Image (cartoon, helix red, strand yellow):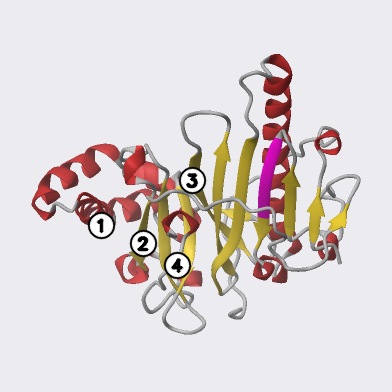
Amino acid sequence: MMRSLILSVALLAALGACGKKTPADAAPEPAAVADAGAPPAMGADDPAGEPVETASVLPDPQTTDIADLPRTITVDNDTLKADISFDEAIFGYAPAMAMDVVEDARIRLTAIEEDAAAYKKAEPQYFHPYGLKIDWKLTGAAGGLAGLEGFQYSYTGGAHGNYMTDGRIYSTLTGDQLRLADLFTDPAADMAAQMNFIHDAIAKQKTIAANNPGAYATFLGEAKDAVTARDVLSGEISLVASTEPGKLGGYVIHFAPYEIGSYAEGAYHIAVPQSAFHEFLKPAYADVFGGEPEDIQRPDKQN
């Protein structure tokens, strides 16, 4: 089984981009329950702790057996330093789900490598190696649904790197990427009914970040101006495990640095417990959610 890859720049240049998956128009019926600080430094060690294999090309996830998809990818040369990892739990459900995130990483890796090589050739006197870190993990799975979170950091020679977290919802039965709207009976009205909770949660997190509880009213007004129900429905959303075994505890809205605050504030992750939206769920998903959201340790919050 291929667990780790070290790729040269020359080999990466041969990679092509594949098409992205189209979100399903409707959510599938659930099956039995399955069960801002600075970004982390990028090391050259093999994260999997297993023998590193060399490869002449990164496998195309659309034509490769699930067992042969890489769990880690490392690039370390004078043009690019990249660390990519995939939670093993992702590979235990529909193959298309794992293939989707591996393909996404493949496209990002190819793009940054090509950009780095072009800049290095054009202005070698100013060039510094680019950096890329991607870490995909499963945040919760139950009743035919799964939540994935992808931490993504890139450095392209500026004053500092940029990072974000990519949240996704998948069907564990088909591997199709779903939308938050697929879970609700009347998405527009149901999300509008949740916005008071979401705006309040944003304002509270901002008072903590600013160490200024007295600014709550100001932050609440800013949140209402900055974030609409449509923004949430079209945003980066993941599902999160529950304190109740075999359930999902809620969903998480991911806001990248600069999106609703300054870069110094970092990313915001707004957890919406299932109790705030359970009444709006389609009947097929009513039994999938319960309890409270589990806390998730995120790479951008590690010291």
The residue lying at 58 percent from left, 72 percent from top is 30
**Disc 4 residue type (three-letter):** Ile
Residue under label 1, please give it.
201
**Disc 1 residue type (three-letter):** Ala
Which badge, 1 or 4, is on the more N-terminal residue? 1
Q: CA distance from mark 1 to mark 4?
A: 16 Å
Q: CA distance from mark 4 to mark 2?
A: 10 Å
Q: Is residue 72 left or right of residue 220?
A: right
**Disc 3 residue type (three-letter):** Met
The residue lying at 69 percent from left, 53 percent from top is 44
Residue 83 painted magenta: yes
Q: Is residue 60 left or right of residue 282?
A: right
Residue under label 2, please give it.
271
Which badge, 4 or 2, is on the more N-terminal residue? 2
Which badge, 2 or 3, is on the more N-terminal residue? 3
Residue 40 sits above or below residue 257 on the image: below
CB atoms at circles 3 and 1 under 8 Å apart?
no
Residue under label 4, please give it.
296
Quadrant of the image for the C terminus?
Answer: bottom left
Numbered circle sitting on residue 164: 3
Element under disc 2? strand
